[in-house]
Each structure stands twice: as structure tokens, then as C-alpha cells.
Image (cartoon, grey):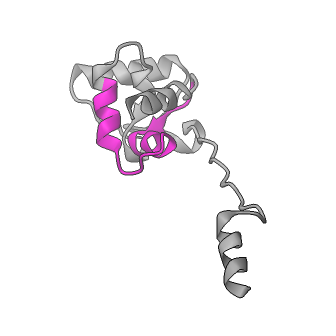
């Protein structure tokens, strides 16, 4: 799980941000936003400043929040008040294509056996 979350975090390029929930979905674990937070907390060398809360809100408090905003502004990210301008800077992960079933799939074979 951790490796897939780290891989998703590393895909977010400079000048873009993503949310904790979007990272969890991109890693294949919808609803695991807290695991993303824990991974960011426990893994060194990740671009932690590019991951924000829903709606572009910086969830950190105190000096860490100022540092995150400063780092994002240095990367060219703009803000609307206290939130990241998500309409401009949100990174959209490419959705994985679902595999289509071939004509010779197991389900098709079962159906053809029933008809016989």
C-alpha cells in the first residue's frame, strides 16, 4: 500500500497540487486519505508541500502551514485567499482503463455451456 501511495505522490509535478483523497484514489485505495497523511509523515524525500486538503486547504498548522504555502508559491502555485486555486493548479490523475472482456472469457464460456 505504502509503495503505491508514494508512487502517486511522486507523480504530482512542480506547480501543481493534489488532495489527500485524490492521492488515495490514484493509488487504488479510495477512502484511505489518512494513510496518505501517515505516508507523508513517515517518508523522507517526498514533495509533501504539493498535497493539500479538499478544496485546496492547507491542513497543517503554525509554522508548517507557512512553510507549505511559501514552498508552493516558490513553485508558482497561486492562492485564492487561504486556499490553493485548484481550478488552475489541481493535478488530474489519468484514470486507468478498464479491461474489456474478450469473447473467450470464462463468463462467456459458462453461458455457452448452459445453452447447450
Q: Residue furthest top?
A: 45
Q: How many marks?
A: 0
10 lies above or below 19:
above
The quadrant of the image that shows the C terminus is bottom right
Tell me which corner region of the image, top left, top right, bottom left or bottom right, holds residue 113. Answer: bottom right
Q: Residue at x 39, y 46 (%)?
A: 54
Tell me which corner region of the image, top left, top right, bottom left or bottom right, holds residue 109. Answer: bottom right
Q: Nearer the viewer, residue 104 or 31?
A: 104
42 lies above or below 59:
above
Q: Estimate the x, y position of residue 114 in percent, counting from the top left.
A: 66, 83
Position of residue 108 in the picture relative to residue 44 (left or right): right
Q: Residue at x 46, y 32 (%)?
A: 4
Q: Estimate the x, y position of residue 21 in percent, counting from the top left.
A: 41, 45
Q: Nearer the viewer, residue 92 or 89?
A: 92
Q: Which residues are the magenta region? A: 15-40
Q: Estimate the x, y position of residue 111 in percent, counting from the top left.
A: 68, 78
Amino acid at each position: 500500500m505504502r509503495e503505491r501511495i508514494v508512487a502517486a505522490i511522486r507523480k504530482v509535478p512542480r506547480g501543481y497540487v493534489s488532495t489527500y483523497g485524490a492521492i488515495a484514489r490514484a493509488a487504488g485505495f479510495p477512502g484511505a486519505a489518512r494513510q496518505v497523511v501517515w505516508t507523508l509523515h513517515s517518508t523522507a524525500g517526498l514533495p509533501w508541500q504539493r498535497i493539500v486538503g479538499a478544496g485546496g486547504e492547507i491542513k497543517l498548522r503554525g509554522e508548517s502551514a507557512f512553510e507549505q504555502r511559501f514552498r508552493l508559491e516558490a513553485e508558482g502555485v497561486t492562492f485564492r485567499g487561504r486556499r490553493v486555486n485548484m481550478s488552475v493548479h489541481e493535478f488530474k490523475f489519468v484514470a486507468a482503463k478498464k479491461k474489456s472482456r474478450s469473447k473467450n472469457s470464462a463468463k462467456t464460456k459458462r453461458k455457452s455451456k448452459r445453452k447447450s
